[in-house]
Amino acid sequence: MSSPLSSARLDRAGTLVGLKRMAPISLFTMAFGLAFGVAALHRGLSGLEAVMMSGLVFAGPAQFAVLEMWGPEIPLVALIATTFAINARHLVMGAAIYPWLRHLPPRQRYLSLTLLSDSNWAMAATDYQRGDTDNVGMLVGAGLALWLAWLIGTLLGVVFSSGITEPERFGLDVIMSCFLMAMLMTGKRDLWVLLPWSVAALTTLAALTWLPANAHVIVGALAGGAVGLLVPPRSTAREAVS
């Protein structure tokens, strides 16, 4: 008997659905892109370099972190380490949705992940928990909406050389985090999930206090992921006993 996950597919209709669902949230991404475009010009990048970075890299926090190191002499090792630390969460995010994508052809599977970000991953994870496993295009379409908004925002910042340089003043820096939490909290209600989340939060706070910058991303993700792997959910444990 085939698994429900084997019916997962990537098509144009599903991609359009994802693009439409993510479009409202993408407006906030555009504001961040605008701020990045302005900041990039102030740090010495050309307009073309800023737009190409947003188009090819598509990693807002990492791009802002790189700007802090940008100068006549770029510390390449530190830049690579920082970028990896900030984006290490994608290792866990990719593993979480792998059972959903594994039945796709390899080309479609890996191309889908090129647009993976926090927001479309949260949306995809919520659909996966609800049993909506057919519409992989939703993940791609939502990622495409975010990528376009980030690219357009960067272009606007470059063209007008003004914008929101301090998004935290307007609360825009927490919009994506709030959206991520809201999406995850609409999944299955199981108090067990509080354990890995609590471990991840506590280790992240400890790493912020005692470890080098950006190390908290890796430490928190690994700690929470390890607890999730080693301690089975209570529902699974009850099924095993019965």
Image: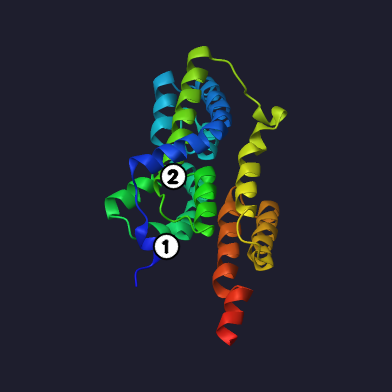
Q: Secondary structure at mark 1?
A: helix
- Residue 137's spot in the image, x, y percent? 39, 45
Residues packed near mark 1 inside 10 Å, few (<14), some (14 to 19) or many (20 plus): few
Disc 1 and disc 2 in contact, CB within 8 angstroms: no
Q: Residue at x 44, y 25 (%)?
A: 50
Q: Amino acid at mark 2?
A: Met
In the image, residue 158 sits, relative to residue 63, either above or below, namely above
The answer for how far apart the CA atoms under marks 1 and 2 are is 16 Å
Q: Secondary structure at mark 2?
A: helix
Q: Residue at x 61, y 81 (%)?
A: 238
| Residue on which disc 1 sits | 99
- Label ID, residue 138: 2
In the image, residue 18 sits, relative to residue 158, either above or below, namely below
Position of residue 40 in the picture relative to residue 55 (left or right): right
- Residue projecting furthest to the top: 160
Quadrant placement of the C terminus: bottom right
Task: Please tell me which of labels 1 and 2 falls first in the chain.
Answer: 1
The image quadrant that residue 188 belongs to is bottom right
- Residue 199's spot in the image, x, y percent? 67, 64
Residues packed near mark 2 inside 10 Å, few (<14), some (14 to 19) or many (20 plus): many
Position of residue 129 in the picture relative to residue 114 (left or right): right
Q: Is residue 240 something one can see in this rendering?
A: yes
Quadrant placement of the N terminus: bottom left
Q: Residue at x 44, y 46 (%)?
A: 139
In the image, residue 216 sits, relative to residue 22, either above or below, namely below
- Residue 6's spot in the image, x, y percent? 35, 62
Q: Residue at x 70, y 53 (%)?
A: 209
Q: Amino acid at mark 1?
A: Pro
- Residue projecting furthest to the bottom: 241
Pick the residue in front: 18 or 225. 18
- Residue 166's spot in the image, x, y percent? 66, 26
Pick the residue in front: 213 or 11. 11
